[in-house]
Every structure is written in structure tokens, then in C-alpha cells.
Amino acid sequence: MPGLIICLICGLAGIVLGGLISIGGKLSLIHAHHRRHLSEEDVPAFARGFGAGLMLIGAGVCLAGLVSFWGRPGAGWALFVLCFAAGLALILRTQRKYARR
């Protein structure tokens, strides 16, 4: 039970932060190094991509905790790895596309 609560708290934190970045446009939540070469016209697209990737990672943590709690820890880990890889790929693609030199 404590593992489920920790997974839900961490996952929801990722989802909320991703939403604040993606929907709210709060780029100040992203380290300045990652937005250094960002042009003003690319800010909305960068925020959507980066925030969506972070929300995907957070959702994967929540779902992995729930699936593991229901007695399928192997499936929970697989789900976490899948969501983490997809979210990280989205963040890296967004970073490479919009915040390059």
C-alpha cells in the first residue's frame, strides 16, 4: 500500500507539472539550459511537446503503481518502461526540434 501511494503522488506530480508546462505555458518550470536557444515563435509548440512528454511519464508511474497493486508487478514495470520511453522520446524530439542552436 505505501508503494501505491508513493507511485500515485509521484505520478500525479509529473502530470500536474506537465500540464502546467503544456497547457499553462509555464516554461519557468523547465531549467534555463533546456530553453536557452528557443525562439519566441516556438515557445507554444515547445511547451506542448515537453509538457506532454512529462505528463506521459507521470501517467506511466501512476498506472504502474495501480497495476502492481492489483497483483501484476511485471505488467506494472512493463507499463512504466513503455510510458517512460515514449515520454522521454517525446521530450528529446521536442528539445531537438525547437531548442537547437
Image (tube, rainbow, N blue to C red):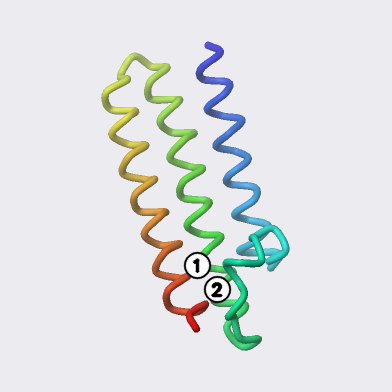
Task: Work out whether 51 lies above or below 10.
Answer: below
Q: Mark 2 belongs to which amino acid?
A: Phe
Q: Secondary structure at mark 2?
A: helix
Task: Work out whether 83 lies above or below 68.
Answer: below
Q: Mark 1 belongs to which amino acid?
A: Gly
Residue identified by numbered label 2: 46
Q: Give the alpha-carbon distance from disc 1 to disc 2, as whole Å.
A: 5 Å
Q: Are marks 1 and 2 in contact (CB under 8 Å)?
A: yes
Q: Quadrant of residue 96?
A: bottom left
Q: Quadrant of residue 45?
A: bottom right
Which residue is at 51% across, 59% downward? 52
Label 1 neighbourhood size at 10 Å, few (<14), some (14-19), many (20+)?
many
- Nearest the camera: 97 or 9? 97
Residue identified by numbered label 1: 49
Relative to 64, 72 lies left or right: left
Residue 54 rendering spot, x and y as whole percentages:
52, 53
Q: Quadrant of residue 81?
A: top left
Task: Work out whether 84 lies above or below 38.
Answer: above
Residue 43 rendering spot, x and y as whole percentages:
62, 78
Which residue is at 28% across, 27% downward? 75
Residue 60 rendering spot, x and y as whole percentages:
43, 40
Which residue is at 58% across, 46% downward? 15
Residue 32 rendering spot, x and y as whole percentages:
66, 66
Relative to 46, 70 lies left or right: left
